[in-house]
Amino acid sequence: MFAKFFENAKVQAGENVIVRESIMHSNVSAGGKIIVDGRKGFLVGGICRANQEIEAKTIGSNMATATELEVGVHPEQRVAYNKIVEKRKEIEKKLDKVEKTLHLLKEFVEEGKTLPPEKKALLSQLEHTRGELKLI
């Protein structure tokens, strides 16, 4: 993909992104390289992700917003990885809640108290859920 400049843009390319003047405050992902050449060659603000290389004459600025660069992982793989990490966090939170509830119910039983039928059913269901969550 070739362009003169990007400003406040969201760009995704399967291969290289070559920009002649500047990338400003944009989100750019490239399966290959991101190259900002030409007279200015500015890459300022936003997030740029490239599988192979990011090249510019000037990257970032003291006056501008944060400039994030990420190189070495295909951007689509990074997105997929981040989704998996988020899903894992959700599962771990659910598992923690299940474990805590199971602990309370089992403590109740160990104290010699009788669980009402709905709590017995909950105990059985939680043990099943814990087993399923640990398999994921």
Image: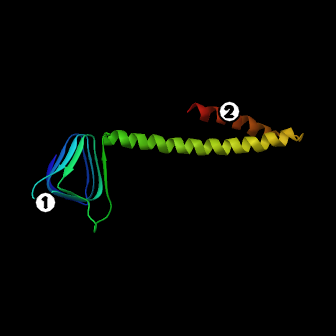
How far apart are labels 2 and 1 at the CA level?
62 Å
Residue lying farthest to the left in this orientation = 39
> Is residue 76 shown left or right of residue 1?
right
| Residue 98 in which image quadrant | top right
Q: Is residue 65 left or right of residue 55?
A: right
Point 41% across, 40% down: residue: 81
Q: Is residue 115 visible?
A: no
Residue type (three-letter) at the residue carrying disc 2: His
Circle 1 is placed at which residue position?
40
Q: Nearer the viewer, residue 7 or 43?
A: 43
Give coordinates of residue 25: x percent, y percent.
27, 60
Q: Quadrant of residue 121?
A: top right
* Up/down of 79 relative to 8, above or below: above
**Residue 80 place in picture, x, y as percent:** 40, 40
Crowding near the residue tagged with mark 2, few <14, some 14–19, many ≥20 C-alpha atoms within 10 Å: few
Q: Are marks 2 and 1 in contact (CB under 8 Å)?
A: no
Identify the coloring.
rainbow
Where residue 65 appears, as percent x and y from the top left, is 31, 64
Q: Which residue is mark 2?
A: 128
Where does the C terminus fall, quadrant-wise?
top right
Label 1 secondary element = loop
Q: Could you tell me which secondary element the residue under label 2 belongs to?
A: helix
Vertical arrangement, residue 13 with respect to residue 68, above or below = above
Residue 108: x and y, percent?
83, 43
Q: Earlier in the sequence, mark 2 or mark 1?
A: 1
